[in-house]
Image (cartoon, helix red, strand yellow):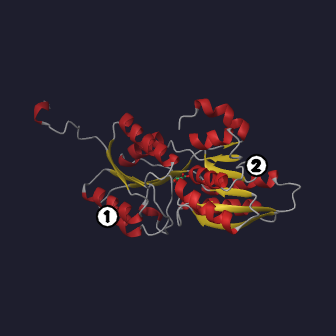
Amino acid sequence: LTACGSGDSSGAADDTITMGFAQVGAESGWRTANTKSVQEAAERAGIELKFSDAQQKQENQIKAIRSFVQQRVDVIAFSPVVETGWDTVLLEAQRAGIPVILTDRSIDSDDTSLYETFLGSDFVEEGRKAGAWLVEESQGESSVNVVELEGTTGAAPAIDRHTGFAEAIAGSNIEIIASQTGDFTRSGGKQVMEAFLKAHDDIDVVYSHNDDMGLGAIEAIEAAGLTPGEDIKIITVDAVKDGMQALADGRINFIVECNPLLGDQLMELAKKVVAGEEVPERVVVEETTFTQEQAAEVLPDRKY
Ligand code: GYE
């Protein structure tokens, strides 16, 4: 075969993989790091990325997936805003013969044939780690009152981080006295914490489902004339740079890591799926936890 390059305006070889990626939004530092990881990994892997930002709305994500199906991409990857309500659109992808990879967040559906694999963290385990630290920390105290800043209502990390935490503190001297969503944003966390502080004068601990809401809560606590990390202890999940800085500064007390750098693993899986190779149905991301001392140690090398 003789190639005649001049006529090919697209510049892409026929075997270039095109991925449609439907992101949740840009609600947190974690999400920003995750988006960057996916975009850079696609570039490195030579995968053409069609990226869409759903601004935390399921309807936008469904529209994006539909448009990827219409464009006949080779593979669709997405991080579902909420757990339920995906069957119809995923069936459309399946009928069009386009494989789907879940990344970061899972869905709640009986039909597991709707996706090839799920790459992401064990959010229940993250909640357990947060609760286990507090149980240890609260030994010898008569009672400990926790307010919980929940992630987006119906999202896998919000549901699972609550479940794991509740499991770990069951039967202890620790009680969740209030729980409300801050939608994983800094402003949401601040607003909810302001309301909590007005309604309760006996808050010992904030358990926040991510760093950003915890950072918002810090602002509310300081505005109320209290010292975060001392008068009220703060536990968060993610371990993004701003969170780790607050931890090293003593304003947060403990962070459970959730790794957003999923890009390279996602591209690997995408290549295999498109090639028709077997992939495991679940790929779990390895993670750790950080105390204030550990945060100060690792901060200089932190990438996100
Ligand atoms: O913890 C939070 C983000 O789905 C794990 O979403 C992700 C969560 C993360 O908004 O900061």
Q: Residues within 10 Å of mark 1 (few under 14, many from 20)?
A: few
Q: Are marks 1 and 2 in contact (CB under 8 Å)?
A: no
Asked whether, in this view, residue 249 is left or right of residue 268, the answer is right
Q: Earlier in the sequence, mark 1 or mark 2?
A: 1
Amino acid type at circle 2 is: Glu
| Residue that appears at 44% across and 69% down | 85
Which numbered marker is on residue 215? none
Real-space Cα distance between discs 1 and 2?
A: 56 Å
Front-lying residue, 273 or 119: 119
Identified by mark 1, the residue type is: Arg
Confirm whether residue 212 shows in the render.
yes
Determine the secondary structure under disc 2: loop
Q: Position of residue 81 (x, y in %)?
A: 46, 60
Q: Quadrant of residue 301?
A: top right
Residue 203: x and y in percent read: 74, 61
Q: Secondary structure at mark 1?
A: helix
